[in-house]
Image: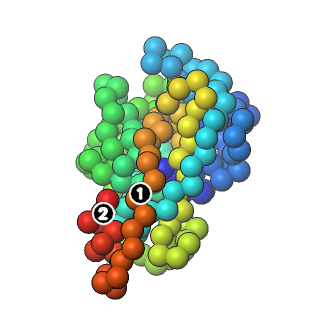
Amino acid sequence: MFSHQTKIYTPDGFAKIRNLKIGHEIISMTDSGKMISSQISEIQKVYVVKEGLLCLRFDHMKKPVYCSVDQEFFYINGSVVSAEKLEIGDELKGLHHQTLRLNTKERIENQETLNKFHQEGDDYVLYNIRIANDETIFFVNIGLMAKAVSYKPAEVYVDTSGNAYASYMENR
């Protein structure tokens, strides 16, 4: 899941995820490595607590990638890794066999950076896209290969103790 400013590769070039709609075409990749044009079948608006946000900076990328800790990317060997498990120096797969090395990874705690996110209440809004033909690999920013997150809405809970964050984390 990505911030509203993340760019997704489309047949017309990169477009911000917040501007994409159901039915829009994006460039995706099949398991066999063939690039195709796919339609977006679902755009999920997901609310994430501050502790669930990461800022990733890669070689050759001017702007960082803001994503959730559970966002999945691809190592050079093709295996999938969540953003939370990435280590500095890891090499990830990009568009046209490009290698993107992770330079920095940090939790977002700086208020100036948090202000770049849309916020509703105490949660921050991220976007997750799903593709109609079940092709799950798509490209963000300058071509970093990403996978749609399998997301289920959290169960609704009522907190009477006054400690909403602790209850939220226990119920996740």
Q: Amino acid at mark 2?
A: Asn
Visible residue check, residue 65: no
Give above or below for 145 relative to 50: above
Front-most of residues 67 and 45: 45
Q: Residue 62: x, y in percent?
A: 53, 52
Q: How is the image coloured?
A: rainbow
**What is the secondary structure assignment of the residue under circle 2?**
helix
Q: Find disc 2 in the rendering and name its residue.
A: 171
Tell me: 156 left or right of 86.
Answer: right
Check disc 1 and report the residue beneath it: 154
Q: Nearer the viewer, residue 111 or 69?
A: 69
The C terminus lies in quadrant: bottom left
Q: Is residue 87 above or below residue 50?
A: above
Q: Do the CB atoms of the residues marked 1 and 2 lie less than 8 Å apart?
A: yes
Q: In the image, which disc is placed on residue 124?
A: none
- The image quadrant that residue 9 belongs to is top right
Q: Residue at x 47, y 75 (%)?
A: 122
Amino acid at circle 1: Ala
User: Alpha carbon of mark 1 to alpha carbon of mark 2: how far?
Assistant: 8 Å
Q: Which of the two residues, 73 or 124, is positioned nearer the viewer here?
A: 124
Residue at image x 29%, y 46%?
Answer: 86
Q: Residue at x 55, y 71 (%)?
A: 119
Q: Residues within 10 Å of mark 1 (few under 14, many from 20)?
A: few
> Residue 60, relative to residue 50: is it above or below?
above
Q: Residue at x 34, y 82 (%)?
A: 160
Question: Which is nearer the eye, 29 or 134?
Answer: 134
Q: Circle 1 — which element?
A: loop
Q: Earlier in the sequence, mark 1 or mark 2?
A: 1
| x, y percent for residue 146 | 46, 38
Q: Can residue 90 be seen here? A: yes
Residue at the far bottom: name it: 162
Question: Pointer 2: residues within 10 angstroms few (<14), some, or many (20+)?
Answer: few
